[in-house]
Amino acid sequence: MTTTVSVEYEYSVDLPLLLDKLNISLLLSTYQAGQVVSIGTFQGQLQVSFSHFQQAMGVTRTSSGIAIGCQQNVWSLPANRAIASRLPPEEQHDIAFLARSCHQTGPLMIHDLAWAGDQLWLVNTLFNCLVTVDQHWSFVPQWKPPFIDEITPEDRCHLNGVAIAEDGSAPLWATALAATNEDQGWREQKATGGCLLHVPSGDLALQGLCMPHSPRLHQEQLYLLNSGQGTLVQVDSSRGEARSVAQLPGFTRGLDCYAGHAFVGLSQIRETAVFGDLPLQESNQELRCGVAMVDLSSGNVEGMLWFRSGVEEVFAVTVLPGYRNPVVIGPDTQTDHTKTIWLVPPQDS
């Protein structure tokens, strides 16, 4: 039996204008609600749609479309322009992403996904390492922090984020909640043990963070989310320093940058066992769930969308440059109330 939850949201009146100006749309994932949310525009009006993916977490652009990390698998959704305008409501969508294949990983606690060097990279949080996907294996280990002594299914440091070089060649940075080598050891250090690691060298470039997530490189600058503080920060890795760019009203997790703007996911804090006793929770401010559009030069929030009900956390935020109104069709057409779509190659007459 499927339980239907009503989702209500509000947004700033200038958000659709800003998305139109940048010629972009957004994808959000939420594992709590099991949804990938598409946010776009059509004729100046904001368009929001939902597609079901079990415990959806990392989302990334790939060479052929997008990939979505879920509870026990990674879905590949090729982009299709031709069929987009035929999907309801007709003549409104400019790109469609349709679930066509999945790679069964087993439960890895997949966090960030990234495309680098023509490969799909996963942050394998359960095994404390960065891995790639190969059809013959659940995953292929590629890198682990130097303080982790073995590849084993113990969430020791809660490795969660990866930043790819701006030329798309390889992973350069990773975030973890603590530099520990004991199962669940990060939990005792979650408020101050967060760290940023330089992947090629394995060096600890920045320490003392509060549950950091989502490192990203943009315009030769490194950004990340100091989630437990509710901040977006810019990192000077040569000095081991971080400068706050913006303070936001939520647990900051999920980040993508485009054209001098940061798109930041925000979550409410409900699970006190993991998120309790954080500076953000102790600030007594009302925490919100949604996405904020931040000007990186000024730190000002230029646009936002907040969920009022149905969604309490956001995991990933992905910008889709060049597309105004995407549609995502997941594997569960019954839950999404969409018709089955068959794609076949052109037939000779």
Image (tube, rainbow, N blue to C red):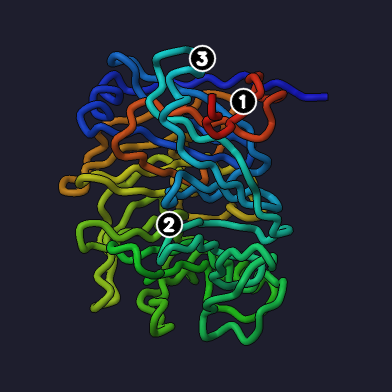
Please name which of the two marks, 2 or 1, marks the residue nearer to the observer. 1
Q: Amino acid at mark 2?
A: Ser
Which residue is labeled 3 in the image?
88
In this rendering, would 83 be left or right of 221?
right
* Most distant residue in the right direction: 1
Q: Which residue is mark 1?
A: 341
Q: Is residue 155 left or right of residue 88?
A: right
| Residue type for callout 3 | Pro
Q: Amino acid at mark 1?
A: Ile
Q: Residues within 10 Å of mark 3 (few under 14, many from 20)?
A: few
What is the number of the mark on residue 214?
Answer: 2
Determine whether the residue tagged by mark 2 lies in a helix, strand or loop: strand
Spatial separation of the CA atoms under disc 3 and disc 2 = 34 Å
**258 relative to 137, above or below:** above
Residue ID at (66%, 35%): 331
- Position of 140 with respect to 289 (left or right) is right
Q: CA distance from mark 2 to mark 1?
A: 34 Å
